[in-house]
Amino acid sequence: MCLAIPGKVEEITTEGGLRMGRVNFGGVVKRVCLDYVPEVEVGDYTIVHVGFALSKIDEETAEQTLKDFREMGVLDEELGSEEEAFTRAAAAPQSACPGGSCAVEKH
Amino acid sequence: MKYLTEFRNGEIAQRMAREIAAITTRPWKIMEVCGGQTHSIIRNGIDQMLPAGIEMIHGPGCPVCVTPLELIDKALAIAAQPGVIFCSFGDMLRVPGTECDLFQVKGACGDVRVVYSPLDAVELAAKNPDKQVVFFGVGFETTAPANAMSVHLAKRRGLKNFSLLVSHVLVPPAISAIMESPGHPNGEDLPLGTPGNKVQAFLLAGHVCSVMGYWEYPPLAEKYRVPLVVTGFEPLDLLDGIRRAVVQLEAGRHEVENAYERVVTFEGNRAAQKLLGEVFEVTDRAWRGIGVIPKSGWRLSDAYREFDAEERFQISGIHTQESALCRAGDVLRGAIKPAECGAFGKECTPRHPLGATMVSSEGACAAYYNYGRFLSAEELAKTVVSCQ
Ligand code: SF4
């Protein structure tokens, strides 16, 4: 949720009074709100936070960042589908176990 | 595990690290506020590339970790109600409440959905007029513009079945709280580097500043006499931020500096700030593990109060109970490293987390565990000694 991911604006529309766009994040395409970045046009790169574009950036920076984020393995977590999020959660921590009463587990 | 040296940028990174070593004459403690940066630092082994005297202290900037337990419990109670569609970012699914987590609520009875954008939750509300749709609006200044727009839109569309469970937190008051907590004598002109004075410089979260700019920070740099460097998330950005902080520290300067110019401007996004000012108002917030920090968060303003899920659902009778072993508060304040917590890697692992800092991938405890940092307190102490 915390990372802003750069993407390329492929299409701009108006939906329900909002300036919306199709943004391509190195292959994954998402619907993104462009209301906060009136200066962004089709073909521009912008950084996007939980579905909202927040500033325009240049192509080189955008591509570089996408590449770095992919290498760091953070892209999937930010852009994954609902299903993927649940799959990840299913594989994640089992219980809160307040007070440390659960079985001790070594790495 | 993928260390920085394996990156295409590995050589440049090594060179930058050597540069930092060349200008460092004394030990310095630098805090990265943001959890995303903590993750990147540990994952890429950046802290281990630095000269021995430079210690990275991990800050409280992980919204998953600092969302108060009481609010998590409220979220769980609301999500379990019939007729509710509870929407959240994926990161919140496994955050432990007192008794369970959102993922378990979904498995048991609740309609819990993960959305990419809060606008998707507004859409769900429009499509399901017979359901109450609640969005769990957590985060720092970064997710706030999205959450603000979602309520704004719900209001404009007259959606009576949409509400926001808000727990927004803000970076500048957290910096003040850290500087004013015991061990950070504020106002006393202690020479930097004396033991009582822990954090000597901050890396500011680049993405927070892409929204807010950095006009809020010069008074903080002045008041606490600390360099504040706006820094990105990628390995080279982090090294550059650290280098600039060290340059300032060595020269005895304390300024706000932007090492993330390609994304961040001084003003930030004015359009977003304008809507934020309309939709939210500043409030005191409890930070999990840390306690209440005055004026450290946002809640919905009067004009939008009707969309506040806490008002709408009036959940009462919450009795929270934190693990007695967990020292997440000390971790979040940068007072201890995760491995210094007695439960780390024993009672507490990502499979059985005792605290939220072990759940979120941006939590310091999880980052240390996942990347195999099992240094004991003694070993850590040795590292500190060896740099003096
Ligand atoms: S290791 Fe676990 S118990 Fe210890 S501070 Fe971190 S989250 Fe809490």
Image (spheres, rainbow, N blue to C red):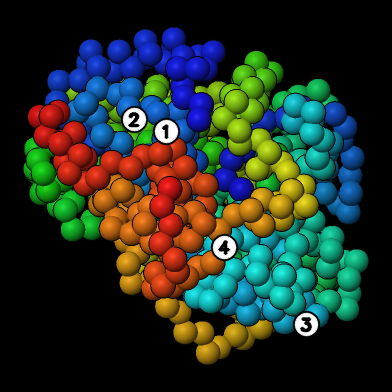
Q: CA distance from mark 3 to mark 2?
A: 48 Å
Residue at 46%, 60% in the rendered image:
B353
- In the rendered image, residue A69, in percent from the top left (x then y), is placed at 60, 29
Q: Are marks 1 and 2 in contact (CB under 8 Å)?
A: yes
- Residue B41 got which mark? 1
Using the image, name the chain to which the residue with label 1 belongs. Answer: B
Q: What residue does disc 2 label? A: B47
Towards the viewer: A8 or A15: A8
Which image quarter holds the C terminus of chain B?
top left
Q: What residue does disc 4 label? A: A94
Q: What residue does disc 3 label? A: B82
- At label 1, the amino acid type is Ile
Front: mark 2 or 4: 4
- At label 2, the amino acid type is Asp
Which quadrant would residue B111 be assigned to in this image? bottom right
Residue density around tag 4, few if under 14, some if 14–19, many if 20 or more, within 10 Å: some
Towards the viewer: A76 or B159: A76
Using the image, name the chain to which the residue with label 4 belongs. Answer: A
Using the image, name the chain to which the residue with label 3 belongs. Answer: B
Q: Are marks 3 and 1 in contact (CB under 8 Å)?
A: no
Residue at 88%, 54% in the rendered image:
A16
Position of B149 relative to B258 (above/below) = below
